[in-house]
Every structure is written in structure tokens, then in C-alpha cells.
Image (tube, grey):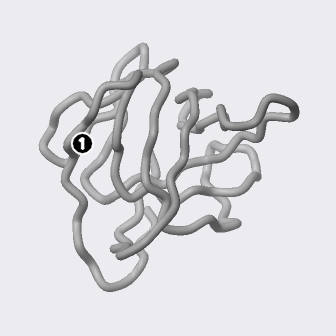
Amino acid sequence: MPIHGQAFKVGAGFDGILHVDGDCVWVEDTNVEIDKEAFNVLWPAGYRARGQPIEIIDARGEVIAREGDAVSFGVGDMELVVIPGCPVRRVLLATELVDVNGQPVNTPTPIVDRPILH
């Protein structure tokens, strides 16, 4: 699962449904009724995906979300970068997961001084 190492002081929020296609972890915007947009996601350093069905693991090693979950997370930026294994589309740089299926999540966010795309 691609990650970034960008620290963010401010950002916007995003609400979506977590999906997986092969090696691509992406979200579908739930704030739009018609023509919902899909976004690839770069997660903070230390986050990873594992298993079938896919689980998202935070930097502490805890399962924080699963494929099909409704997720809300902070977005520090939106970029056009190519992520291997994913269709070409806009990419959200997630800061931290705020809630999953309406339940609050407390996840760590690493602090670095520049983006690192993996």
C-alpha cells in the first residue's frame, strides 16, 4: 500500500467508502450523490494493508479499517501522481483516520519535513 511522509498542519476532511482492487487501495466520495469520484490514497508512513479481505493497519500495528468501511480522514493535499497498480486518478494524501463507520479512531500521525512517496 503506497504511503507518504508529509506532515500537515492544516487540511480538509474527506468521507468515503474504502475499496481495494488488487494492490490499489482507493476511496469513493460519499459526499456526492451523482457522479461520485474515486481517489487513490497515499497513507501516512507506517500504515499498511494486509490480508483478504484487506485491513488497514496503523503505525502502531492496529487494524483501523477494512475494505467496505465508511471512513473519514484528514487530507493534507491532493496530487496527480501515478501509483503503481492503481488507475490514473487524483490522489489524496491522508493525514490520519478520524472515524470508521461513525466510530472515532485515534491514530498516530508521523511528523516529517518533506513528502516521501513509497
Tell me what residue is drawn at x 76 percent, y 52 percent: 88
Q: Secondary structure at mark 1?
A: loop
Q: Residue beneath label 1, please? A: 58
The percent coordinates of residue 43 (x first, y second) are: 41, 52
The percent coordinates of residue 47 (x first, y second) are: 30, 47
Tell me what residue is drawn at x 41 percent, y 64 percent: 4
10 horizontally vs 13: left or right: left
The quadrant in which the N terminus is found is top left
Total number of numbered discs in the rendering: 1
Quarter-of-image position of residue 61: top left
Mark 1 crowdedness (10 Å alpha carbons): few <14, some 14-19, many ≥20: many
**Residue sitting farthest toward the top:** 53
68 horizontally vs 65: left or right: right
Task: Choose between 17 and 53: the one closer to the eye.
Answer: 17
Amino acid type at mark 1: Asp
* 52 shown above or below 13: above
Quarter-of-image position of residue 72: top left
Quarter-of-image position of residue 29: top right
Task: Choose between 100 and 113: the one closer to the eye.
Answer: 100
Tell me what residue is drawn at x 27 percent, y 78 percent: 112
